[in-house]
Amino acid sequence: RNAGQIPMPVSGQLDLAAAMATAGGLAETADASNIQLVRAKGATFTYSMSSIVNGPNGRIKLEAGDRIIVNQSAFVGKTVTILGQVGRQGPIGFPVNGQLDLVSAIAFAGGLTDLANPKKITINRKGNVITLDYREISQRGDKRFMLQPDDIVNVPERLF
């Protein structure tokens, strides 16, 4: 959240978790799975925020001249487009963690309308069309269908 230099405490003791907290944590658009610690001596190590907060990596001692680099998520600005028989057609922003499944995307689009045909939902992924049974996927729950940026989801109207 607050990029810049962090002064080393008088004690000379600063660990990775304390440095991250001093900087205000991660910005909303940060890639929490790719936090780099570049040592002043040249070595580079990569950590996830969860391993820093919940694991031993947070206790790694920093030295003067070390740098922590947190890049923006590659999913910032990416979308999935939902068309057809949903509450709100159009683009859905992709989560910065890169995890978006079909059921969640349709929920973000306001759900299926009464005219939707849930058995023949199509996903256009760079020209490759995949047909899915939404009811089976949503009821099963054990195996989610993960979407990718730029997918186009089409929910057709059922025929009476």
Image: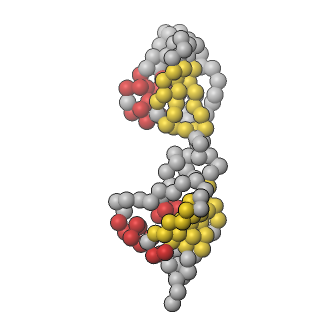
Q: Is residue 58 visible?
A: yes
- Left or right of residue 131, residue 143 in this image: left
Q: Is residue 111 above or below residue 33?
A: below
Q: Residue furthest front?
A: 128
What is the total number of numbered labels drawn onto the structure image? 0
In the image, what residue occupies the spot 49% across and 51% down? 99
Q: Is residue 138 above or below residue 35?
A: below
In the image, what residue occupies the spot 49% across and 9% down? 11
> In which quadrant of the rendered image does the N terminus lie?
top right
Q: Name the foreground residue: 132 vs 117.
A: 132
Residue 71: x percent and y percent? 59, 34
Residue 123: x percent and y percent? 54, 65
Q: Residue furthest bottom?
A: 160
Question: Which quadrant holds residue 57?
Answer: top left
Q: Name the foreground residue: 58 vs 153.
A: 153
Q: Name the foreground residue: 60 vs 125.
A: 125
Q: Is residue 143 above or below residue 59?
A: below
Q: Is residue 130 above or below residue 62?
A: below
Q: Is residue 9 visible?
A: no
In the image, what residue occupies the spot 34% across and 60% down? 142
